[in-house]
Amino acid sequence: MSVTPDIEVPKAPPGFLRRLVRSPSGAIGLIIVLLLIFCALFADVLAPYDPNKMGSGGRFLPPSGDYPLGTDEFGRDMLSRILFGSRITLIVGAVAVGISLTIGMAVGMIAAFRRGWVEAILMRGTDVLFSFTETLIALSFVAVLGPSLQNAIIAVGVAGIPFYARTCYSAALVETSKPYFEASIAAGARPTRLVLVHLLPNVMPTMIVVATLGVSTAILAAAGLSFLGLGAQPPTSEWGYMLAGSRDYINRAPWLMTIPGIAIAITVLGFNLLGDGLRTSLDPVERK
Amino acid sequence: MKLFERSWRATAGAIGLVAGLANAAAADDIVWARYGDIDSLDPHRATSTLSLQVWSLMYDTLLATDAEGLPVPHIAKSWEANADGTEYTFSLQEGVMCHDATPLDANDVKYTIDAAFSETTPSVTKGSWGPISDVEVVDPLTVKLTLDTPFVALIPFLADSFSSIICDSNAGAEGFGTTSAIGSGPWKLVSWTRGDRIVLEKNADYTNYGKLAENPGAPYEDGLIITVVPEPQARLAALKTGEVHIAEPPFDDVPTIVNEGDLSIIVAENTGQNVFWEFAVHRPPFNDVRARLAVAHATDAATAISLIYGDLSIQENCPVSRGVFGNDQEFCAQYRPAYDPEKAKELLAELGYTMDNPLETAMLVWTGGNRQKLGEVFQAQLAEVGIKASIEIMDIGSLNARVRQENETTEGTTGSMDMMTWSWYDPDILHALWHTPGAYRGYTSPELDAMLAETRVLTDPEARKAKVQEVFKYLLENAIHVPLYTPGWEWVFAVRPEVEGFFVAPFVYPNFSDVQLGG
Amino acid sequence: MWRFLSTRILMGALTIWITTVLVTLLIHAVPGDPVQIMYAQSQGTTPEQIEEVRRSLGLDRPIPVQYAMFMERLVQGDLGNTIRGGQPVLDVIMQRLPNTLVLACAAMFIAVLIGVPIGFLAAYRKGSLTDITLMIIAIAGISMPHFWLGLMLLFYFAVELGWLPVSGNGWLNLVLPALTLGLSNAAIFARLTRSSMIDVMNQDYVQTALAKGLPKALVLRRHVLRAGLLPVVTMMGLQFAFMMGGAIVVENIFSWNGVGRMAVEAIFQRDYPIIQGFILTFSVVVVLVAITIDALYAVLDPRIRRS
């Protein structure tokens, strides 16, 4: 498929990566996220112990050389559990956002492209779902499907769809309203081609920013469900679940509750900073 | 101690906010905090222990239990049965009054039992009332129950709060069970704010005939407030500041509380509760007794309990717990499959399972009491011998439904086992669980049916005990009902120093009649 | 303005109507037999009674008929009875809804009170160290899981220091949950206020006013504040819904007797009538709040007022 020279193909603005790394939030965010991905990928190698093996050490050992983050009520190594937890957390974020993003973008782009009654139905429907709020959608899903990590991920993913659809729709609308676009349609350009070559690359930057920020929301939401007991089930080393389970030991072993909390906060902060940095470096207004 | 309360009230249908100062706890109110709320004030509408505990304060029963858990006279000053065990006649105490100052007599007893067997809205515990076919008011102080078949468990049932006598003045009352409830017990209902608190005041005219308490009359303190505080650490904080007098502490803090010595710890004994493994027996792998035995042999209950509950809970060897008729630790220990991981591995090997080809099963656990942590330990123990169990946590209601569903599923190779809990005052519970068709449609067999049927009709205690123990042996040897422990933890109470006279009667009924707030 | 509002009201009505449909369908999406599950704890029920319950709930009828029955009861203010305890669902919800609304309003108050001035200050000092510091704090605030913040506050102020009561629904009980919800949302308001203020400051008329030599403080007060707060007002509607959602977690931590805690209990107990009632109530509240905010916006924004 060749690109006709008279049509300007938008790309990510030049030098965007450099700007991203130069902005303090982008740089810090990128470092945190890369570190997380590293931990998640190599959890098997990095973790000193089996995360679910009881009695790896004594119970409630405070952080020390052998157990850098201490041990929990079953003598499981906290560092290993946190490391394996990062894997779960990233999977939760990626899958949930993946669900929201693919369905949301499909809805948004179809609505912006087809216009007319299709647009009306899709976007009014999205508005209605949007006013349900993500929490309510997620909770209803879990209420029906029953508590499990998998269901929590689906719930959070579905709950995010209206937001992604809306954002994608407005981004796509900017492009489809341009004269060249209307002209191409009039000239009989193939819809698939128009969508893939013109629409998609134009909405992508916005959607990448939204998705990056969305990962943090999804992680928080899923951890919240696990915290309530509506998500991950034992012995999964999901951070929200670990945090909830260690409440009883706050007096004896405060680190059991503090550490998963900090892990969640840092992860979410990482994605927030990265998303912020991406927005700044992709946004033509802020660039000035 | 000062405690200001504001309760928000809403007129149904409108979202109007009307603030009002209400429920200010007076200095002489006892405040008891629990993790959850009751389901209903109507004893025919719920089965939770949290509900039963409150009914036992507000209502009376025909009989009561003594410190050992045995039935003794209460509102019924005596009773007699015919030789067949199909007719029971109770003579009632004279002068018992309901909270609305109407007398409590045979008509109220009839009203209660008729309501339990109501065509349209039967009691949720209808089955436990047994085969009652007729209730006759012989005279105001005499009531006669006629049964279709003998039912020995009737007497202990009539001593439990499931059989609370509902005064007939509740008939047709608007909001009975939610905003009003007339009983005859030591405490009267003032108000119930669902999810928040139940406010009771003392029944100044109360006479205690048989309930376990030193106090022969009305409670010493004027009021009793039962609040809901789900977060254990928050309950502990409230105990320390004096906001509440009695509460279940976070169990991990119990040793510290004991060491500090400010609060005293009271552990409920003879709770009658039995936590046990049971299995989906109508499909592989647990249709084979060897698979069930493997689980039983792989389970080190004593270690798991001490890990999670410290010394607040004890291992139980019998299918009905200590304090219940027939329980005998030594007898049951002979037959209960002991912890023996090697034996478990052998059995699994016979069935073709290895560490690389593990037996896979779901492990269903119900919420609360740190049972999910216990499940996690058992999960690790089973993994040691090559049983891969995935934990699913659910509410007790969902668990009941799920277990039955699992038993009705005959296809598949993934097993299902569950940590079930039953609390009952009589071995008749085993009839409900394991006599055809079985409460959960689980294991049944003709020989077990025959034994269980006999436990219902043998009126001679020694003969009944022998038969009950035969049932124990059968259930244990076939690993149908594998007892794990009898809970202490959920029923550990931390009590402030100024509280005197608080105790917990058998089957976890906390009693406040003797309580005095000193200091 | 009326056209604007009537569109909003129509959308709101549509939302609530769709909720009623979804809520009717909800019970059919449950794996297994919902009636069996709901009545599992009741040992007296015979198969005949289960059938009776199914009939009385209309579950044996075609779904459109069920929907009609549901709506018929709904207009009479009947949301059915709870499975546990058999009480009217509407009463159970109405007893607790005010608590959740009070919590959400208090949290909103805290969020605006803290967030807006911070955002304003950051915008005023745009690019300065103050701005950067404040925005870092804000982004950290957004990243903090509120269930963690809540537990920490609970342990410190109620458990360690014993300053605040832990049970009941009094004003003192409100402090910690409202603070937990309010703080994380304050960060969102701070960021929004800042960017909105900066947008307005870059507008030509503001630049002109400044160029004319009018005092900066006066320009800010007269021109920037009002225009800059408009998006914040719009945001409040969305944030309110967000806080109602956040209340679900926070109520569970602080024993606050609201509908969020009720909903989580109901999910565990499979008490579907309560879950249905909760979803319906939640969406009604969110829609009403959104319409109110839109009306407020219409009053504040001269462009809409004139149209």
Image (tube, rainbow, N blue to C red):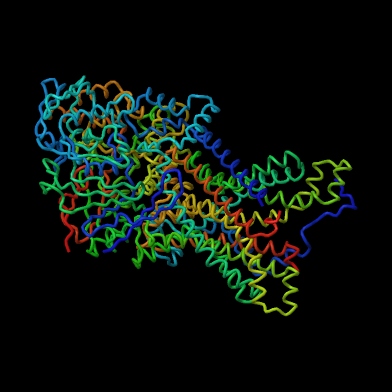
- Quarter occupied by the C terminus of chain B: bottom left
Q: Is residue B486 visible?
A: yes
In this view, the residue in front, B480 or C248, is C248
Decide: is A145 above or below B81: below
Decide: is B452 above or below B321: above
Q: Is residue B391 visible?
A: no
B270 with respect to A126 (left or right): left
Q: Position of residue B382 (x, y in %)?
A: 39, 43
B509 with respect to A13 (left or right): left
**Picture residue at 26% right of the left edge, 22% below the top:** B447
Q: Position of residue B238 (x, y in %)?
A: 31, 60
**Picture residue at 84% right of the left edge, 48% below the top:** A181
In this view, the residue in front, B439 or B181, is B181
Residue B381, quarter of the rendered image: top left
- Quarter occupied by the N terminus of chain B: bottom left
A123 with respect to B129 (left or right): right
In this view, the residue in front, C173 or B130, is C173
Q: Position of residue C31 (x, y in %)?
A: 49, 33
